[in-house]
Image: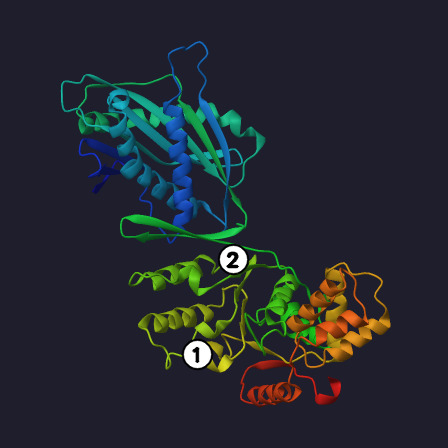
């Protein structure tokens, strides 16, 4: 429970909590702080650091005053967005509110014998190149419900900012004095609120916390979900792409660079934000998606149903929406939805959750600030067509089975990957000939089988032996190419088509 009062241009907020009914807290600031939309993960991160600092500081003994020194912590906190003074005000207010409303009451309940007659008073200051100003201050403690004459005050200043210089430590003493003066200025209110007669002030603070908020992209995406009485943390690690466009035929790379990667790298507003890669299994859709991410300098975030689907009603939608919201303004990643057939058409959906998923993704793909989104699919006709319209998916890349030139490039890259040396041009040409109508995955499998047969070496005999293990129907695969060509004619998107003719195979 909180009550807000404004007196003499100072805004006060009184706090009580069900965690400890004998506990009270007072927050004050020079103006009403209006909360704006802010990443709650960052609030939790800041409040955890403040709580850790308070716990360590309260354990710092003043018994031997001759050698007592305040506990100083200097920490850098990485944030994913640019923070201005207004953001930091909101961040300070929400963090201090969380500390005084939930964390400090628990600590005082556990250590009532030691902290029962102590007011713990953290204050947060904004610092920028020699200028500092108190944003918000507060005190929390146990109400005296018996005969009490005096309480100790423990001031704990916290300095927060984005740009610090070497002079910050020279201002530390001034900030400590200011925090004690601020507490003294609201002393009458504290005496009345906690039912005490006198406050005893120290000569120095127990500790000083310096928090530098530094813009930095995280190596993972984390979201916190409330599930019943538990907080569930979902963490998705980003990964570096392991393929690049140099591994693909020049004829397709040229179009990709012109229509996709160059506009994105140059920051053009018309650059595509959504790309769908279509083709039979094994032709390299996922690999090409990684190569595109690598070319535009992005790490990959994989979105799979197993990450966000939940057995609890309503949780699937909540998790998916939070995940997508958390990455909306990220500039360091590309979202990869591999095998996107699970985004089945709403007309074919057998569960209401699937319909909700599509609705959430439709809204997300409409956001112009989203990261580049890459989807792959063997059968795009199963995917809800509203997801694939221009504006959500701007470019569709259609991949058929590799032609002779592409197979040669694939074979050379695979031999290099497996560190196979001294392979003659004639042998490479023979492998190209024998892998007609093979997809990329099957070419890789054939070479691995041949290497196993040859005990690490590859020759005509081992290639022949491996080739006999594959049953490839040229007529069936030619028919697949015809079906792909028919499908391309029904697409309204910009299409990059790589479906080789029969004579090129």
Residue 330 is labelled as: 2
State left or right for residue 129 relative to residue 102: right
Q: Say what secondary structure mark 1 lies in.
A: loop
Residue farthest to the left, as pictured? 146
In the image, residue 231 above or below residue 210: below
Confirm or deny contact between disc 2 and disc 1 (CB under 8 A). no
Disc 2 versus disc 1: distance between alpha carbons? 26 Å
Residue 254 lies in quadrant: bottom right
Q: Is residue 169 above or below residue 147?
A: below
Q: How crowded is mark 1: few (under 14 residues within 10 Å), some or many (20 or more)?
A: many
List x then y, in percent, for residue 25.
25, 33
* Residue 11 seen in this snapshot: no
Query: Where does residue 104 sit, x and y in percent of width and height?
Result: 30, 33
Quarter of the image containing the N terminus?
A: top left
Q: Quadrant of residue 453?
A: bottom right
User: Residue, x 73% and y 60% (percent of image)?
Assistant: 418
Q: Residue 323, position in %: x, y?
A: 43, 59
Number of marks present in the image shown: 2
| Residue at (48, 63) in percent of width and height | 303
Q: Name the residue under label 1.
A: 384
Give the quadrant of the C terminus.
bottom right
Q: Where is residue 260 in the image (x, y as percent from the top left)?
A: 63, 71
Nearest to the observer: residue 444 or residue 59: 444
């Amino acid at each position: 429970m909180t009550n807000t009062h404004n007196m003499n241009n100072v805004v006060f907020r009184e706090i009580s909590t069900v965690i400890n009914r004998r506990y009270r807290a007072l927050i004050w600031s020079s103006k009403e702080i209006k909360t704006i939309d802010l990443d709650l993960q960052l609030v939790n991160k800041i409040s955890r650091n403040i709580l850790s600092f308070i716990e360590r500081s309260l354990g710092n003994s003043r018994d031997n005053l001759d050698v007592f020194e305040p506990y100083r912590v200097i920490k850098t906190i990485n944030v994913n967005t640019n923070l201005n003074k207004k953001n930091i005000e909101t961040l300070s207010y929400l963090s201090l509110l969380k500390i005084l409303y939930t964390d400090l009451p628990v600590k005082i309940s556990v250590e009532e014998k030691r902290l029962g007659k102590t007011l713990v008073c953290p204050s947060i200051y904004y610092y920028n190149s020699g200028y500092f100003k108190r944003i918000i201050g507060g005190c929390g403690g146990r109400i005296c419900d018996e005969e009490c004459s005096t309480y100790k005050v423990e001031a704990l200043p916290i300095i927060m900012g984005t740009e610090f210089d070497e002079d910050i430590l020279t201002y530390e003493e001034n900030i400590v004095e200011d925090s004690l003066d601020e507490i003294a200025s609201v002393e009458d209110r504290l005496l009345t609120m906690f039912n005490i007669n006198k406050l005893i002030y120290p000569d120095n603070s127990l500790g000083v916390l310096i928090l530098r908020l530094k813009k930095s992209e995280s190596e993972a995406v984390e979201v916190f979900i409330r599930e019943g009485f538990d907080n569930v943390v979902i963490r998705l690690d980003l990964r570096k792409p392991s393929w690049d466009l140099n591994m693909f035929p020049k004829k397709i790379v040229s179009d990709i660079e012109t229509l996709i990667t160059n506009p994105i790298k140059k920051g053009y507003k018309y650059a595509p934000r959504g790309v769908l890669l279509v083709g039979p299994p094994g032709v390299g859709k996922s690999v090409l998606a990684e190569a595109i991410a690598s070319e535009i300098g992005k790490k990959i975030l994989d979105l799979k149903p197993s990450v966000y689907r939940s057995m609890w009603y309503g949780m699937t939608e909540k998790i998916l929406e939070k995940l997508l919201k958390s990455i909306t303004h990220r500039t360091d990643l590309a979202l990869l939805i591999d095998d996107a057939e699970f985004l089945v058409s709403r007309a074919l959906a057998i569960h209401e959750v699937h319909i909700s998923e599509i609705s959430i993704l439709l809204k997300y793909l409409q956001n112009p600030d989203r990261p580049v989104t890459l989807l792959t699919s063997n059968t795009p006709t199963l995917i809800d067509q509203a997801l694939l319209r221009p504006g959500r998916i701007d470019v569709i890349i259609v991949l058929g089975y590799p032609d002779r030139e592409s197979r040669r490039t694939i074979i050379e890259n695979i031999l290099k990957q497996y560190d196979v040396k001294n392979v003659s041009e004639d042998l490479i040409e023979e492998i190209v000939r024998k892998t007609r109508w093979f997809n990329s995955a099957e070419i890789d499998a054939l070479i691995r089988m041949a290497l196993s047969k040859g005990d690490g070496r590859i020759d005509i005999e081992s290639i022949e032996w491996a080739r006999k293990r594959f049953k490839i129907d040229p007529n069936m695969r030619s028919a697949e190419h015809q079906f792909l060509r028919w499908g391309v004619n029904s697409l309204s998107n910009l299409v990059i088509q790589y479906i080789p003719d029969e004579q090129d195979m």
